[in-house]
Image: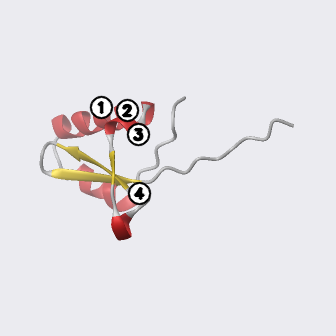
């Protein structure tokens, strides 16, 4: 099952400041995340419960949440 990824506008602006190589590696990391966010990320604890993190390039942190919508079988 593939998940839908939505990147917020501030993150898009941030990403445009970097060169194409960083952008390509970021896109590859997001594709992995889209396939299985629970394997590639790590859940945060405490007041940040419900938010997950994934490190990128050993200096950036991608924060994300998962919203699971159930489908009616009827």
Residue at 29% from the left image edge and 31% from the top image edge: 28
Up the image or down, 5 lies above or below 73; here it is below
Q: Nearer the viewer, mark 1 or mark 3?
A: 3
The residue tagged 2 is: 31
Judge by depth and name the residue closer to the eye, 23 or 36: 36
Q: Name the residue under label 4.
A: 8
Residue position marked by numbered label 1 in the rendering: 28
Query: Left of 61 or right of it: where is 74?
Result: right
| Residue 52 appears in view | yes
**Residue to which mark 3 is pinned:** 38
Which circle's residue, 1 or 3, is located before the other in the chain?
Answer: 1
Instruction: Note whether 61 is above or below 70 in the view shown.
Output: below
Give the image quarter of residue 23.
Answer: top left
- Marks 3 and 2 sit apart, C-alpha to C-alpha, by 13 Å
Farthest residue to the left: give it. Answer: 58
* Labels 3 and 4: the sequence-earlier one: 4
Q: Residues within 10 Å of mark 4 (few under 14, many from 20)?
A: few
In the image, residue 36 lies at what x, y percent? Answer: 43, 33
Q: How far apart are marks 1 and 3 (CA)?
A: 16 Å
Residue 12 visible here: no
Q: How is the image coloured?
A: secondary structure
């Amino acid at each position: 099952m593939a998940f839908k990824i939505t990147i917020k506008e501030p993150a898009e602006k941030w990403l445009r400041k970097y060169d194409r190589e960083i952008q390509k590696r970021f896109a590859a990391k997001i594709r992995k995340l889209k396939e299985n966010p629970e394997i590639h990320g790590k859940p945060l604890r405490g007041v940040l419960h419900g938010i997950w993190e994934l490190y990128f390039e050993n200096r950036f942190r991608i924060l994300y949440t998962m919203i699971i919508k159930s489908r009616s079988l009827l």
